[in-house]
Image (cartoon, grey):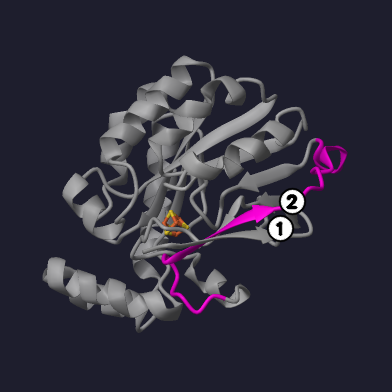
Amino acid sequence: MVVERITEIKNYLTKSKLKEANYVVNPYSGCPCKCLYCYASYMVNFTRHHETWGNFIDVKYTPKKINISKIRDKAVFFGNVTEPYNEFEEKYRASRKLLEQLSLSGAYISLFTKSDMVVQDLELLKTFEHLKVVMSICTLDENLKSKLELNTSSIASRIEALRELKKNGIKTVVFISPIFPFITDYQGIIEETRDFVDEYWFDQLVLRYNFKKPVLNFICENFPIYSEVYEKIYTEKSFDYFAELSQEIDSYCIDNGLNFKNFIK
Ligand code: SF4
């Protein structure tokens, strides 16, 4: 069971340490999607929860309006450490309410999601001056997706959502992330989506904190042939695989005339 709580905060806007964003906005703290590889799970340390990551959700609230004049022309990541369209969005509409405030801000918003539920706010999204919906996909294999991400939309429905967004004039990005060495077929994802996607972003699987072991165990059980090479990458810290892949991705995108951002480093 996921523990729900409404948490009063001081401000929705947080200054970002990321190179690509000036501010981040996360309507929720916690995330019930339960991705095995969740890079955001360290956020549990900034809460007072004794529940583990994935088993609580705090709906952030403040009566103070976002100071939108502060973010005009600034890059804002929305939902970078939670899923803004998680199962509790139906009930609380926290993402919807924040997007309503941001719609006339003139900020460059990147709305991160893994959910087809984003389409329910299509009319609102159309009112933004600069907005991209960044849909994360790490595999086309629904069976593998269900094992890696317990509570996220199917890949087919994410792809359908991208098609719908694009049809309605919304800028679409597929974030091919996290790239699982030898498993994520980035070219296959591009081929499947390029008719209705404006941009591709790429990032590698990073393993740290307490999710490193479960992911390595998962690979060992499900992809034993890659077990050794994952050990090399993630235990011996060899960067050769990703260095080569990064170059390959750059060449592939340039040769195919794709707009892209490669965050592999
Ligand atoms: S959707 Fe994002 S924040 Fe939520 S569990 Fe998955 S990786 Fe973590």
Dot 1 lies on which element? Answer: loop
**Ligand 1 visible in quadrant:** bottom left
Residue 191 shows in the view: no
Q: Amino acid at mark 1?
A: Ser
Q: Earlier in the sequence, mark 1 or mark 2?
A: 1
Is residue 250 a member of the stretch shown in magenta? no
| Residue in the picture at 67% in, 40% down | 98
* Residue 111 spot, x, y in % from top left: 57, 40
Determine the image quadrant of residue 46: bottom right
Q: What count of labels does the image hold?
A: 2
> Which residue position holds label 2?
22
Residue lying farthest to the bottom in this orientation: 236
Secondary structure of the residue carrying numbered label 2: loop
Kind of residue indicated by mark 2: Asn
Q: Residues within 10 Å of mark 2 (few under 14, many from 20)?
A: some
Residue 4 position, x and y percent, is 50, 60
Is residue 130 left or right of 35 when viewed as pictured?
right
The span picked out in magenta is 49-72
Relative to residue 46, is residue 92 depicted above or below?
A: above
**Contact (Cβ within 8 Å) of mark 1 with mark 2:** yes
